[in-house]
Amino acid sequence: MAEDTSVLVLLFVISALLVGALLKSCSRFIPVPYSVALLIIGLGAGLAGRDSAMSSIEQAVHNLASIEPHLILLLFLPTLIFESAFSLEPHLFKRMFSQIAILAVPGMLLSTLLTGALAYYLFPWQWSWTICLLFGALISATDPVAVVALLKEVSSRKRLEILIEGESLLNDGTAIVLFALFYGLLSQGGGSFSIIEFSGSFIYVVVLGFFIGIVIGALVLLWIAKLFNQLTTEITLTIAAAYLAYYIAENVLHASGVVAVVSLGVMLAALGRTKISPEVADFLHHFWQMMAHVANTLIFILVGLIIAVRIRLDVVDWWFNLLLLYIGIQLIRALCVIILMPLLSRFGIGINRDKAVVLIWGGLRGAVSLALALIIAQDSLLPKELGDQVLFLTAGIVVMTIVINSSSMRWVLAKLKLDQLPAAQQLTVEKVKYSVKQELLLAIPTLKKNEFLQRANWEKLIGDYEKIPPPKTEQTLDSSIAFRRRILEAERKFYWSQFANGEQTGTATEHLVDAVEKALDGEPKLAPRDSLLRLWRTPWIVLFCSRYPLLNRVALHFAFERLALSYDTARSFVQAQEEIIPYVASLAPSDADKEAVLAEIEQNKKATRRRIEELRDCFPDISYSLETHTAHRLMLNLERAHIETLVNEGVLANNEAEKLVTELERQLAGLRKQPNMVSAKLISEILSTLAWAEGLKPSTLDQLGKIAIRQIFNSGELLYKQHTKAQLIGVIIRGQVERQSVEHEIVVSRADIIGTYGLLSGRYNDSAKAVTPVELLWFDITKLRHIIARDLALAQVIEQQLHQELTP
């Protein structure tokens, strides 16, 4: 029997996938969404098997429909939830999280309460409040997969997609947690209810689930960071992580498995893109899309089978109650969104009336609701009549929302004019299409020279393209915003391309992409890039720690790392500005927009080139190290690309090429880590290279080396302020410093000593500010006095510097 069941499951999977492939192949001729068609096929197969004259078919259908509900959740939820979370745009999800959370938590709680009240007063079955709220929780879980798929197909409404899909992700988690809490209360006989205890349990389950996902995500990222271009291993880790997070949360620690998988998926999407090998990243996303497609195909047919086989169809009153319930939950959904509209409009990116309508009508119910209803139906401790009623109503709502709401969503989008691009975006698309046609016309003379295209009807072909009119040119606020968004998105794409090609580090890519996404927030802004300017400054914590001997070494390391990151980001930023210039002329809605954007790009380039020149002049070893590292990686990537070309051309066999590629990838893996930027020489050795240190005793240099504190400042940062208490004097190792007071402004550089007046008066007689990035050695005045007392040469050096400071 076990063998027969295994074969049956295999046949079901194969048949379902074939049916799905057939539907996809004929999608142009099928008027309903893919998921609706699958559900209808499942219903048809279930009804046919239910009344089949062949006992073997009937038995097979019943076996499939008898699948354990917890197994449905364990098999399908990790895949579907992880894929949705992993495919979200992290920055946009973060911006919209407040709206998503409002819908998924307060909105879900409100929907549960209102649906529970509707069930209590509408149904004639005398359900207790515990049962009604249990039913309200399970029936409020949304599954808008068909709506999201339709939005992706008919228009580019990324924000609306993320709002609907994000709500569904967290909504499922909230629904399952509420269901578990009410189900536990029902199992205990519906005893006393404490809102404080209930709220505490809810928060505990959600927060613990969140941390489980974060911990597993961190472990996976640490593991993946040690790998390089190991496609099967990296994909296997993500699969194992998704199922492990769900299982540990649900079955071991009794937390929210959905929240665990959501936090895992979002974490890998946000932090994993620069940790996962660039060569693997795209394939990984395609793999999870395929997994989600397979899971959706199986689950919608399975839902149809379960509904057709397991629900009772012979009680007329139940059908009437189902119709009233369907109308009721639509009104409740609308009421919840309307009540929350003031919050949804104020937080995140806001929401308008048309999108709220889509949000209301897109509240479909799916497999999660049905699986939770099956748990009740299969509980032998609950009355069978109760289980049948809950299963019938849930199955009916699942079918009606998928068939009615999903099938009519295209019409709703058309009525709201959300089935097309906004006018400004459409204008940009038209300009792109026209630009492509013009490029093709320029290429036609070359094509005409091809000896095998001499008989082509060029006159007709060219005529069709020459008839295409240029898009209208107009300057409106919307068109200007859409144009700038396209330019910024092209810049962001360039950074990912640079990272994939090995031309910039993962850390630099994260910061550059983050800068673009901040520029895209609200009204898009090309210049200045405030987030990059902040990145190029030394963090206050580094400046603070560098003054303390125990923390100085760590602070110094981070300071050099920051300078290296500044150079890497600045270099890539200039390249990106050069890269996007060609798009400006072809996409600009007007000449004024084109000139304004070109001016902003030029402003970015000038400011950044100034930063690069400062770093090259003051810290040449950093630029040398980074550029050598990048050039090495590019050479290895080019070598690998050439080997792949030879394989494609048949010059090299696959097994021959594999050995060569393996060696190259071993070298590339070694280059993944950012190079060591500066070899930290002994401070005494650094001091010995300064002109004024030639006459000092070796012991003096050693003693100075022991008390010195090494520190990095970025241009524009204050070293000390006039009239403040002097505890340190400094020696400039690299860069330029401006000493400022009412009487003078003097620029000093390498080997100069600053702050020497503090030795006499205990206070600085001027202020000092870094003109360029600066490396300094600070010396404690009290300790320095003891060293000066033992070395006359050092005393003379300080005296000369003091004289220069007092008589500028």
Image: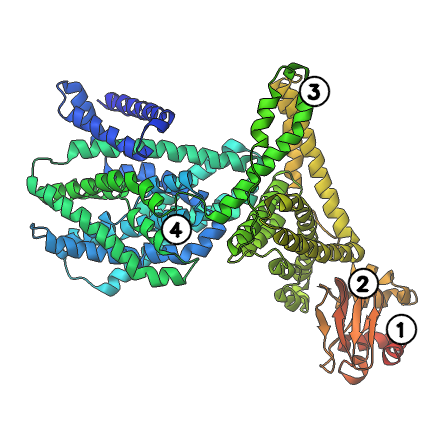
Please report contact status of discs 4 and 1: CB closer than 8 Å, yes or no. Answer: no
Circle 4 Cα neighbour tier, 10 Å, few/some/many (<14 / 14–19 / ≥20): many
- The residue mark sitting in front, 2 or 1, is 2
The amino acid on which the numbered mark 4 sits, given as a three-letter code, is: Leu
Q: Is residue 434 above or below residue 730?
A: above
Residue where numbered disc 2 is placed:
733
Q: Secondary structure at mark 1?
A: helix
Is residue 183 visible in the rendered image? The answer is no
* In the image: residue 40, left or right of residue 714: left
Q: Secondary structure at mark 3?
A: loop
Give how far across and how far down residue 590 sits, in percent.
60, 50
Q: Is residue 238 above or below residue 352?
A: above
Placement of the N terminus among the 4 image quadrants: top left
Quarter of the view holding residue 304: top left
In this view, which residue lies farthest toward the right? 695
Q: Residue at x 64, y 18 (%)?
A: 649
- How far apart are the two marked residues, 4 and 2, measured between alpha carbons? 53 Å
- The residue mark sitting in front, 1 or 3, is 3
State the mark number for residue 449.
3
Q: Secondary structure at mark 4?
A: helix
Residue where numbered disc 4 is placed:
163
Give how far across and how far down residue 341 sits, in percent.
33, 60
Earlier residue among tags 3 and 2: 3
Placement of the C terminus among the 4 image quadrants: bottom right
